[in-house]
Image (cartoon, helix red, strand yellow):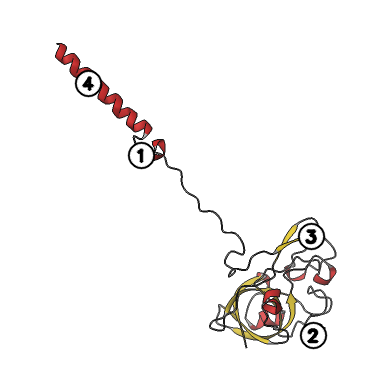
Amino acid sequence: MAANVKVLVVLALLQLMSLHAVVHGGDNGGVSAVATGKHEPKPKQGGGGDGGCHISGFLHGKAGKCNRAHGSDCCVAGRRYPQFRCSPPVSSARPTPATLTLNSFARGGDGGGRSSCDGRFHPDTAMVVALSSGWLRLDGARRCNRMIRVAAGNGRSALARVVDECDSVNGCDAEHNFEPPCPNDVVDGSPAVWKALGLDEGVGEFKVTWSDV
């Protein structure tokens, strides 16, 4: 009888030890061994795929008379808009990815003032574009009045002359149609460029590539 009691006591102790090990995880770090937290990677800082070109500052928005043609994004008073003093690097080995936007370079159009490269307005039938500040001048290339080739993913491409800057630093004033600074990867094309590429102006933005000619 005494022997049976001893066996029961030993079994009870073994069960208690086993339960303790499950709850506390034994020697492998405690409860985290049973319910580990998922590790979330930290978000990347900066331009996010822009070839090392990061935000250089912020412009405080000021609202004004903004021509909303072609889906213009008008400044909101008090909002902070990112500024860029660079653009993704350009390689002579392959075309450069960009975002094609729509702009009228004509007098009274949503492009604001005269084109910065030649001091002129250009009709919507002209094959002209503006480039983000980094691509136009800040990377040392000085592309004013040069020709570039813009290619869409539909197999069509077009030659266009660079006549203006899509200012990535300044904005929210009359000169810039009270629009925020441009992103750093923009080719701002005239309606004629969009037509030559066979694109619908209603889309507003389209992923393209471009290269120097």
Quarter of the rendering containing residue 62? bottom right
Q: Quadrant of residue 211?
A: bottom right
Q: Name the amino acid, label 1.
A: Asn
Q: Amino acid at mark 3?
A: Gly
Question: Which three-letter amino acid code belongs to the residue tagged 2?
Answer: Asp
Among numbered discs 1 and 4, the one appearing first in the sequence: 4
Residue corresponding to mark 4: 10
Q: SS for tag 4? A: helix
Image spot of residue 68 (x, y percent): 78, 67
Instruction: Say if residue 98 shows up in the picture.
Output: yes
Q: Which residue position is annotated with label 3? A: 61
> Left or right: where does residue 192 sit relative to residue 153?
right
Q: Which of the two residues, 179 or 6, is positioned nearer the viewer here? A: 6
The residue under the point 73% across, 87% down is: 145
Q: CA distance from mark 2 to mark 1?
A: 72 Å
Give coordinates of residue 185: x percent, y percent: 64, 72
> How many numbered marks are there?
4
Residue 118, labelled with which disc? 2
User: Along the polypeptide, which appears first: circle 4 or circle 2?
Assistant: 4
Q: Are marks 2 and 1 in contact (CB under 8 Å)?
A: no
Label at residue 28: 1
